[in-house]
Amino acid sequence: MNTSRNKQQQNRSQGSPNKQPLTFVSEGVTNIEDENEKAKLEQEKFERESKIRSRKTLRDQLRSSAISKQKEFNGLVKQRESFNRLNEEEIEFFKSIEDAKLAEESKMNEYLSSKLNTFEKKKRLLELKSKKKPSASVHDSDKSPKLTTPSPRIVKIKSKKKKLGLKVNLKP
């Protein structure tokens, strides 16, 4: 009988590792309520001791927290850099595009400056010719008829408005 009781106590104690095995109280020796309170106090003491044993020191807690935060930060940095980082081929591609734009812009500037120079030359030639003609026309005014340019006139264009086809008779 004693061995079966020990087996039951072992089974109960193995079922929950944080609890102490139950001890039986013989009748009439002590009060059951007092025994229950003592058992609860002992159980709480046992649980506190097991928590203290499993608790890390403050230094270990801070160290593990710092390590986890550093790992998280490194992961974020790696993710950000992998997203924004360009390899050599991409860098060369963007440089070639930029160089092509600069070359095209310089060609356009050269073209515009050459056209501007030719325009300025033609303008000067026309100005010189126009200065020479009035002086010649003053001397030759009797011989050649003057060319007159037509003066600009204002021409009104009638708009084609669609008529509704309704006529109003105001006469009686």
Image (cartoon, rainbow, N blue to C red):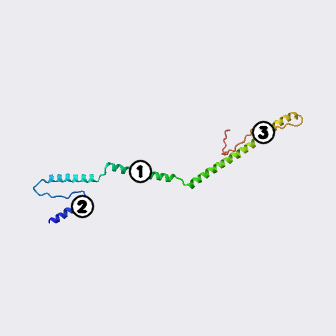
Residue 38 drawn above or below residue 147: below
Q: Seen from this angle, which residue lies furthest left?
A: 28
Q: Could you tell me the amino acid type at mark 3?
A: Arg
Q: Could you tell me the amino acid type at mark 2?
A: Gly
Depth check, mark 1 against mark 2: the one in front is 1
| Quadrant of the rendering where the C terminus is positioned | top right
How far apart marks 3 and 2 lie (CA) works out to: 112 Å
Label 3 vs 1, first from the N-terminus: 1
Using residue 125 as the reference point, say whether residue 23 is left or right of it. Answer: left
**Tags 3 and 1 touching, CB below 8 Å:** no
Q: Seen from this angle, which residue lies furthest front?
A: 59
**Tags 3 and 2 touching, CB below 8 Å:** no
> Which residue has dot 1 on it?
70
Crowding near the residue tagged with mark 1, few <14, some 14–19, many ≥20 C-alpha atoms within 10 Å:
few
> Could you say which disc has been placed on residue 124 in the image?
3
Depth check, mark 3 against mark 1: the one in front is 1
Residue 24 location, x and y as percent?
Answer: 15, 58
> Which residue has dot 2 on it?
15
Residue 43 location, x and y as percent?
Answer: 21, 54
Q: Could you tell me the amino acid type at mark 1?
A: Gln
Residue 157 drawn above or below residue 18: above
Residue 82 location, x and y as percent?
Answer: 49, 54
**Tags 1 and 2 touching, CB below 8 Å:** no
Label 1 vs 2, first from the N-terminus: 2
How far apart marks 1 and 2 lie (CA) works out to: 40 Å
Using residue 96 as the reference point, say whether residue 116 is left or right of it. Answer: right
